[in-house]
Image (tube, rainbow, N blue to C red):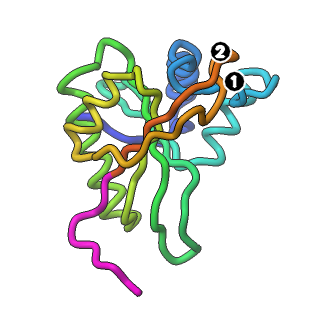
């Protein structure tokens, strides 16, 4: 059963998550992400400024997930952007199980109403994972950023907590 833990719980957790980030950053980041900051410093700051969790299976980091760009206030959260990364050995049913557990945790523990994911259109693995977890495509942002010095579209997927009513 996967555990979602603080990456600083053990030094090895942070190191393993950093290794995963370095390995898969080309699928996670655009040209502006690191902004000439050393990768360790960038990743350390990312872990500090987001709701960041390592996903641990038998004391090995199988992946990480974090929530960024949180909308809300000190008393309640409304929405956030989700980013996730798994070691290739764990792709498939395991990632789907983790997604469901983590989303339930976000909705129940933190009270989020909506979780978004911004992905590159060619990232079909993440699209499949998001759809299996209940996300729906919300938008296509044309030429939203630069990636490898080329204009890059971004797709926005989201899931809304069941039972949320409009408050006006």
The percent coordinates of residue 34 (x first, y second) are 73, 27
Q: Where does label 2 land, which residue?
A: 148
Q: Where does label 1 land, which residue?
A: 31
Residue drawn 38% across and 60% down? Answer: 114
Residue 167 belongs to the span the image colors magenta: yes
- Residue at far right of view: 36
Whether residue 167 appears in this view of the structure is yes
Residue 99 drawn above or below residue 104 = above
The percent coordinates of residue 95 (x first, y second) are 27, 29
Residue 120 belongs to the span the image colors magenta: no
Residue drawn 37% across and 49% down? Answer: 138
Residue drawn 20% across and 36% down? Answer: 97
Magenta region, residue range: 159-168
Residue 154 drawn above or below residue 92 = below
Q: Residue 106 carries which label?
A: none
The CA distance from mark 2 to mark 1 is 6 Å
Q: In this view, does 69 lie to the left or right of 42?
A: left
Image quadrant occupied by the C terminus:
bottom left
Q: Residues within 10 Å of mark 1 (few under 14, many from 20)?
A: some
Which one is earlier in the sequence, the residue at label 2 or at label 1? 1
Of 126 and 24, nearer the camera is: 126
Mark 1 secondary-structure assignment: loop
Give the main secondary structure of the magenta stretch. loop
Image quadrant occupied by the N terminus:
top left
Q: Is residue 78 left or right of residue 73?
A: left
Whether residue 61 appears in this view of the structure is no
């Amino acid at each position: 059963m996967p555990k979602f833990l603080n990456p600083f719980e053990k030094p090895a957790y942070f190191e393993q998550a950093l290794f995963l980030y370095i390995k898969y950053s080309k699928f996670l980041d655009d040209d502006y992400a690191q902004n000439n900051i050393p990768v360790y410093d960038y990743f350390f700051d990312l872990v500090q400024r987001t709701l960041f969790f390592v996903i641990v299976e038998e004391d090995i980091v199988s992946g990480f997930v974090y929530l960024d760009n949180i909308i809300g206030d000190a008393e309640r959260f409304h929405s956030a952007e989700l980013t996730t990364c798994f070691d290739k050995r764990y792709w498939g049913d395991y990632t789907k199980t983790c997604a469901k557990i983590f989303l339930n945790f976000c909705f129940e523990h933190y009270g989020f109403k909506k979780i978004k994911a911004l992905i590159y259109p060619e990232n079909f693995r993440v699209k499949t994972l998001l759809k299996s977890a209940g996300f729906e495509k919300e938008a296509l942002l044309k030429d939203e950023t630069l990636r490898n010095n080329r204009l890059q579209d971004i797709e926005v997927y989201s899931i809304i907590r069941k039972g949320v009513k409009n408050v006006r």
